[in-house]
Image: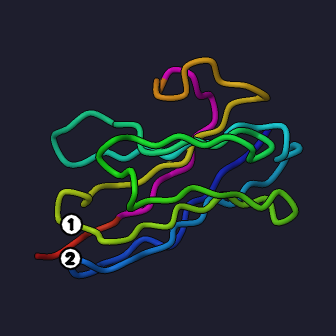
């Protein structure tokens, strides 16, 4: 089974950038589709971006499209989320999640069995 650990969160001013990392251990990372979700205080966890196990297909939420880019390096067992032009509305705990081989509904939290502990992103105005 794969274990996930997010890093790279922090405090940034509006308009700034951050790169989150999701490092995996255990299992064969290249066998897992991975997604990023986020959860702001008082809100439900929401889909941010997803990448297939080989990295040949990606998708992202409309709210981050054009600003956030998901990528992966299977040799390093890591998935990245490059976040640009951040706004205070992006403030949340960001989680990575993995599912074995293929995710039919990548935007749904119940599609994922493996989750990291999350990393806080705070964007000040």
**Alpha carbons under labels 1 and 2: distance apart:** 5 Å
Question: Where, quadrant-wise, is the N terminus in this rendering?
Answer: top right
Q: Residue at x 70, y 37 (%)?
A: 33
Name the spot of residue 14 as percent of width and height, x first. Answer: 20, 76
Q: Is residue 10 left or right of residue 95?
A: left
How many residues crowd mark 2 within 10 Å: few (<14), some (14–19), many (20+)? some
Task: Tell me if residue 17 comes above or below residue 68 in the rendering.
Answer: below
Figure quadrant of the C terminus: bottom left
Compare residues 5 and 11 and report the one nearer the observer: 11
Circles 1 and 2 in contact, beta carbons < 8 Å:
yes
**Magenta span:** 110-120
The percent position of residue 74, horizontal first and vertical second, equals 82, 57
Magenta highlight on residue 56: no
Q: Name the mark on residue 87.
A: 1
Q: Secondary structure at mark 2?
A: loop
On screen, residue 33 versus residue 1, left or right, reads: left
**Relative to 9, residue 101 above or below:** above
């Amino acid at each position: 089974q794969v274990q996930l650990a997010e890093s790279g969160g922090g405090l940034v001013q509006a308009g700034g950038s951050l790169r989150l990392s999701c490092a995996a251990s255990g299992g064969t990372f290249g066998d897992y589709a991975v997604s990023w979700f986020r959860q702001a205080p008082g809100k439900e966890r929401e889909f941010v971006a997803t990448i297939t196990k080989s990295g040949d297909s990606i998708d992202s939420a409309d709210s981050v499209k054009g600003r956030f880019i998901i990528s992966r390096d299977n040799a390093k067992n890591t998935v990245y989320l490059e976040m640009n032009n951040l706004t205070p509305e992006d403030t949340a705990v960001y989680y990575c999640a993995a599912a074995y081989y293929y995710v039919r509904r990548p935007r749904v939290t119940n599609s994922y069995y493996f989750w990291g502990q999350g990393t806080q992103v705070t964007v000040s105005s």
